[in-house]
Amino acid sequence: MLEIGKVERYIHEKLEREKLHFVLLDPDDVTPEEAAKIAEMSEETGVDAIMIGGSTGAEGEVLDGVVRAIKESSDLPTILFPGSHGGISKYADAIFFMSLLNSTNPFFITGAQALGAFQVKRYGLEPIPMAYLIIEPGETVGWVGDAKPIPRHKPKIAAAYALAGQYLGMRLVYLEAGSGASQPVPPEMIALVKHVIDVPLIVGGGIRTAEQARAAVKAGADIIVTGTAIEKAGSLEKAGKKLRELNRGIKGRD
Ligand SMILES: CC(C)=CCC/C(C)=C/CC/C(C)=C/CC/C(C)=C/COP(=O)(O)OP(=O)(O)O
Ligand SMILES: O=P(O)(O)OC[C@@H](O)CO
Ligand SMILES: [Mg+2]
């Protein structure tokens, strides 16, 4: 019998009360010690989950080390955000089992998934099926994932892909402008996508301020992902301040 796993249930239950903030840590950019500290601060400041991944090199021992450090320092759910079948760690709770629907390369649509499937089963990781869509500019992940990035001024294309993802059985949709994007996904696009789908909507890429996070939530985003703004805050103290600022924007508290 197919059952909804623990982390997915946690997401749905929390979404009944508030919008969520997930923090993305890239093992290529943070040491296990830094990751542990950020995860601890994330939990203290009201972040809802930690995502772990990167489009280049987040694999093997380096990945395992970061996931383990996060698990030791916080009780937040850890969700893998893999760039390929190499991005799987047995120490995480769940994995966004994603398909890059607007890739031009079948490897990112079904290939990496087939290569990783048995490993996910062996480790008992919770797979959460997700439609992953790259919006302009797309940044590194757009290039690495051989995406045909959806133009920023074409919300209908994003909505069509998102609905197709839902009809294919995916239980989350992720609109991705790319890590470090100069501009986040436009609110008009978020609004149209949210209007047509019934599954939770994740938005990430280039969200650096409480105002940007608020605008995405107001447009209809259910979950906001931030990475660069925290990783590149400059110091742990500044990262903590940034976490609180972004949470405020997302949760609508002040
Ligand atoms: C489900 C399985 C086993 C694999 C999925 C494989 C797919 C579809 C990958 C999509 C394409 C891709 C390269 C995704 C990476 C997503 C990601 C972790 C982005 C964040 O990383 P960045 O911060 O952009 O990476 P860099 O820091 O390396 O630029
Ligand atoms: O690093 P940022 O720009 O916050 O992007 C987060 C995430 O959407 C990248 O996959
Ligand atoms: Mg990164």
Image (cartoon, rainbow, N blue to C red):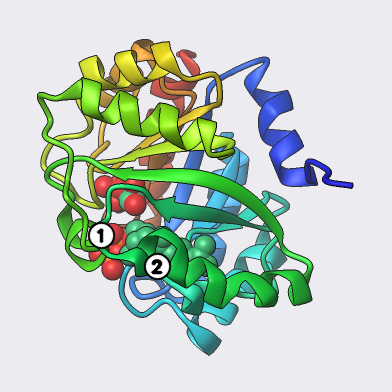
| Residue 229 in sight | no
The image position of residue 113, as x and y in percent, is 52, 66
- Residue 190: which quarter of the image? top left
Mark 2 Cβ inside 8 Å of ligand 1: yes
Q: Amino acid at mark 1?
A: Val
The image position of residue 227, as x and y in percent, is 35, 51
Q: Residue at x 55, y 53 (%)?
A: 96
Q: Residue at x 46, y 63 (%)?
A: 110
> Seen from this angle, which residue lies furthest right?
1
Q: Which residue is mark 2?
A: 83
Gap between marks 2 and 1 measured at Cα = 8 Å
Count residues near mark 2 (Cα–Cα under 10 Å), then give few for <14, some for 14-19, many for 20+.
many
- Mark 1 and mark 2 in contact (Cβ < 8 Å)? yes
Q: Amino acid at mark 2?
A: Gly
The image position of residue 212, as x and y in percent, is 26, 25
Label 1 residue SS: helix
Tell me the tag on residue 141. Answer: 1
Q: Is residue 74 left or right of residue 41?
A: right
The image position of residue 155, as x and y in percent, is 21, 22
Q: Is residue 65 left or right of residue 58?
A: right
- In the figure, 180 relative to 17: above or below? below
